[in-house]
Amino acid sequence: MSKAVLIVDDDAAMCEMMAKGLARMGFPCEFRTSAREALAAMETGTFDVVVTDLNMRAMNGLELCARIVADRPDVPVVVITAFGSLETAIGAIRAGAYDFVPKPVDVETLALTVARAAEKRALREEVRRLRQALTETRRFDQMIGDSTPMRKLGALLSQIVDADASVLIMGESGTGKELVAAALHRMGPRKTAPFVAINCAAMPEPLLESELFGHARGAFTDARADRAGLFVQAEGGTLFLDEIGDMPLTMQAKLLRALQERKVRPVGGDREIAFDVRVIAATNRDLETAVAEQRFREDLYFRVNVIQVAVPPLRARGNDVLLLAQAFVEQFAARSAKKVTGIGTATAERLLSYQWPGNVRELQNAIERAVAVTQFAEIHVDDLPERIRDYHASHIVVAAEDPSELSTMEEVERRYIARVMQAVGGNKTLAARVLGLDRKTLYNKLAKHDGD
């Protein structure tokens, strides 16, 4: 986008020379031959950069610079001077100038300086916009996002927050499934009762059973006293079963019975205990495929999947990446007491082009690292982890000048299916929907291509 420049010099010929030179390089210009005329022009016009001569009658360039910095701190000022001494440079910087250019003016040097000044202003505006957007795009319980998938997610959560039915949250690792579960709890009628979470993939079956249902004294070697399980600890509140798709089959049967009866029997106990909790489960697995392959009980799937919530991957959320990045910058800058205000434009482009296989968790870690290592007020590309700095998007090439380089239709299909499977994190059910195939057809194609 072209940046408008206001040139100020009491030598009209010099103004015309600079204006024509900058215009040839893509900068539309206006000029005024006095500081007062320039101040009047700024009240009615929109300029991205001001270029002013130092030595002018009535009000000199440093005085004009100080006025502009006081009244319009968002507009950078470049000072031109015939006196390229250190004292002059210090005076210009102290007056708030972005930079200074010595006479005789080299238009290319001036254009580079103006471009950098305009980029700095654009960055300031982007930081301001992101900060404002953070307050305007928090959808459900402060969840950040203005993309279509996040708008739909927020609308669905608002519809189901007061329901007591079981919820199954589907999504890739790092998308924030537990945050969604916690938000449903905080915004719902059970918010004053406990929110209790457990990772079903993080412990062996005997320990998982004891954690969920509790145990009686003497049930096993270390059971020195009765202990209430998480179903009882979450009484009146919400029990979050994370990574339920990794639960062993025998444990799935016990969980199903507890959910059906609304009672649990502690390990080694002789009586059942009733519970009243809302159950929210989450998984990054394709449970429909797991059911078809008899790795997950179909009856348990229907029991926990009364309401299904799909959390979109970060790569599907567009500019939400920048909103989240800005939020993380502010969070980690405050935590480390560093004056880091935002991200540079080149950094923003890199963040948007990256595919984020680790989703929001990966972005959070990347920004935490960047804030820790940066020496600037904005995050630069070099502050990002190497895998993000050096990332280049891969594309399937199906055209070439040399016919021998063209791929067969079968190869194109194989590579495209592989690309879709990668994009959906290996979820065969979702891949089949994207490809417009039924699951059986997709399985056959995958088996065929794997065997080739």
Image (spheres, rainbow, N blue to C red):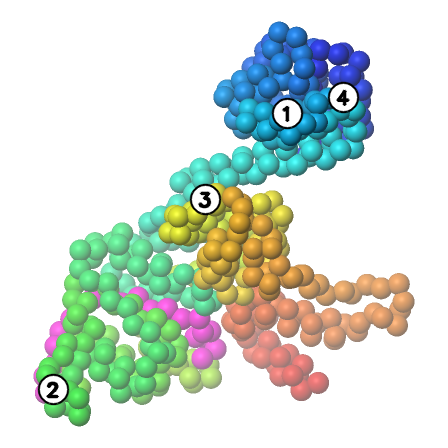
Establish if 15 lies above or below 172: above
Looking at the image, is mark 4 or mark 2 nearer the viewer? Answer: 4
Name the amino acid type tagged 3: Lys
Name the amino acid type tagged 2: Arg
Q: Which mark is residue 88?
A: 1
The residue under the point 45% across, 40% down is: 131
Q: Quadrant of residue 74?
A: top right
250 displayed left or right of 266: right
> Residue lying farthest bottom?
221
Q: Examine the structure image and report whether residue 91 is included in the region drawn in magenta.
A: no
Establish if 102 lies above or below 212: above
Name the amino acid type tagged 4: Ala
The residue wearing badge 2 is 224
The residue wearing badge 4 is 19
The earlier-in-sequence mark between 2 and 3 is 2
408 displayed left or right of 431: right
The residue wearing badge 3 is 339
> Residue lying farthest top?
58
Establish if 90 lies above or below 227: above
The earlier-in-sequence mark between 2 and 1 is 1
Q: Residues within 10 Å of mark 4 (few under 14, many from 20)?
A: many
Q: Position of residue 267 (x, y in %)?
A: 17, 86
Q: Residues under labels 3 and 4: Cα distance?
A: 37 Å
The earlier-in-sequence mark between 3 and 1 is 1
Q: Residues under labels 2 and 3: Cα distance?
A: 53 Å
